[in-house]
């Protein structure tokens, strides 16, 4: 199925082709190519509004995920006999302005960071959470696996941004 990549902001210059290529590799690693996935890049104002509306946190953030299947358990894919309209994992909103500022402050590559945060968002769409120490460990292991496989495919050296639950 398809990856829908939209850039709804004009604050940060964004080349969609490299991001699309990287997310397609992640989809292949996770074996979720048959599912639709929305990736929407937004500025601080929009991500703050969405964060306030759905999480009651009136601050910008790096990523927000909205799964189509809200009751998935971690590492569970939706059923095999889905109607084509149901082959949708959900949408991920990337706060690209927020992420660009973080990258500038911490000296990180912007597209590498977008890749890591996209992998994190996809994990959320697949039922992973990080509300408890145990959930965080499970999600960290999955993200590490995905990024290690990505590194093998691309020669990059990506790793999860958070090293422990207290950084969440």
Image (cartoon, rainbow, N blue to C red):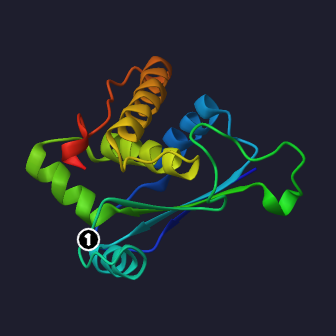
In the rendered image, which quarter is residue 59 located in? Answer: bottom left
Local packing at callout 1 (Cα closer than 10 Å; few below 14, some 14-19, many 20+) is many
Question: What residue is drawn where x is 37% and y is 73%?
Answer: 55
Image x and y of residue 155, in percent: 40, 20
Give the total of numbered labels. Answer: 1
x, y percent for residue 78: 74, 47
Q: Is residue 105 left or right of residue 147?
A: left
Identity of the residue drawn at 60% across and 44% down: 73
Q: Quadrant of residue 163?
A: top left
Left or right position of 55 against 69: left
Q: Nearer the viewer, residue 8 or 132?
A: 132
Residue 145 point in image, percent of width and height: 46, 24
Does 140 appear above or below 45?
A: above
Q: Position of residue 23 (x, y in %)?
A: 53, 43
* Up-down relation of residue 152 to residue 159 (above or below): above
- According to the image, label 1 marks what residue? 60
The quadrant holding residue 37 is bottom right
User: Seen in the image, is 26 located left or right of residue 55?
Assistant: right
Classify residue 100 as left or right of residue 85: left
Secondary element under disc 1, as helix, strand or loop, is loop
Residue at 49% x, 39% y: name it: 22
Question: Which of 77 and 152 lies nearest the eye of the viewer?
Answer: 77
Residue at the image point whose x is 61% and y is 39% from the top: 27
Residue closest to the eye, 133 or 97: 133
């Amino acid at each position: 199925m398809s990856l829908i990549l939209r850039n709804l902001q004009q604050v940060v210059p964004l080349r969609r082709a490299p991001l699309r290529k990287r997310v397609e590799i992640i989809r292949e690693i996770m074996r979720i190519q048959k599912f639709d996935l929305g990736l929407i890049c937004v500025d601080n104002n929009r991500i703050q509004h969405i964060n306030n509306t759905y999480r009651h946190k009136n601050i910008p953030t790096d990523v927000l995920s909205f799964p189509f299947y809200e009751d998935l358990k971690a590492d569970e894919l939706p059923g095999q006999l889905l109607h084509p309209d149901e082959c949708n994992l959900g949408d991920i909103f990337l706060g690209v302005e927020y992420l660009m500022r973080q990258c500038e402050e911490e000296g990180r590559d912007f597209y590498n960071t977008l890749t890591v945060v996209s992998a994190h968002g996809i994990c959320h769409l697949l039922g992973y959470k990080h509300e408890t120490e145990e959930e965080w460990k499970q999600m960290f292991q999955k993200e590490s696996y995905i990024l290690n496989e990505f590194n093998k495919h691309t020669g990059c050296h990506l790793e999860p941004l958070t090293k422990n639950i207290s950084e969440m």
